[in-house]
Image (cartoon, rainbow, N blue to C red):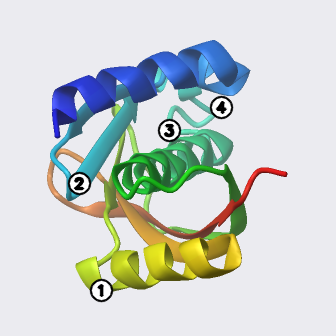
Amino acid sequence: MNYSEAARGLQDFLLLNVPLARAAKLSVESYDGHSLVLSAPLEENINDKGTAFGGSLYNVCVSAAWGMSCLKTNELGCDGDLVVAKAEIEYLRPLRETLRAQAQAPSDEALKLFQETFLRRGKASFEVSVVVKDSHNKTCATFRGKYALLKKA
């Protein structure tokens, strides 16, 4: 698997198909099969207090989790419509710099169960966790999303 090629493909997809990703100047920084990092400049995502806008933090997190889900379902050879089924974010401290969201891949066991369930039932889901930290490694936001893949009709 060529992870840098997958990351470029995800970047192209987001910018072509998600207007909010374009507006936020969202970019895929890295993907290594276990971790996906998306970022967006503060300037396009700032609020009246000079910190990252909460909606922008949510956008970067939900996009990172969706991106990880998309990459993993593709790697598993499961084709369908990927949707967010549930999402929750906690804002822990203000962020005054680049928004950088790091999504972690589900465990190998969770991915295996997902694949088996999708092949058997035509739908399956898993959870993805995302963290946003500042340059001092302090956690500014945490996100947890449940993503479902539904077999195309």
Name the amino acid type tagged 2.
Ser
Find disc 2 in the rendering and name its residue: 35
The reply to whether discs 4 and 3 touch (Cβ–Cβ < 8 Å) is no
Find disc 3 in the rendering and name its residue: 51
**Which mark is first along the chain, 2 or 3?**
2
Quarter of the view holding residue 146: bottom right
**Which mark is first along the chain, 2 or 4?**
2
* Inter-mark Cα distance, 4 to 2: 32 Å
Find disc 1 in the rendering and name its residue: 109
Name the amino acid type tagged 1.
Glu
What's the residue at 42%, 47% (across, down)?
74
Name the amino acid type tagged 4.
Asp
**Which mark is first along the chain, 3 or 1?**
3
Q: Quadrant of the N terminus?
A: top left
* Inter-mark Cα distance, 1 to 3: 38 Å
Find disc 4 in the rendering and name its residue: 48
* Residue 62 place in picture, x, y as percent: 57, 51
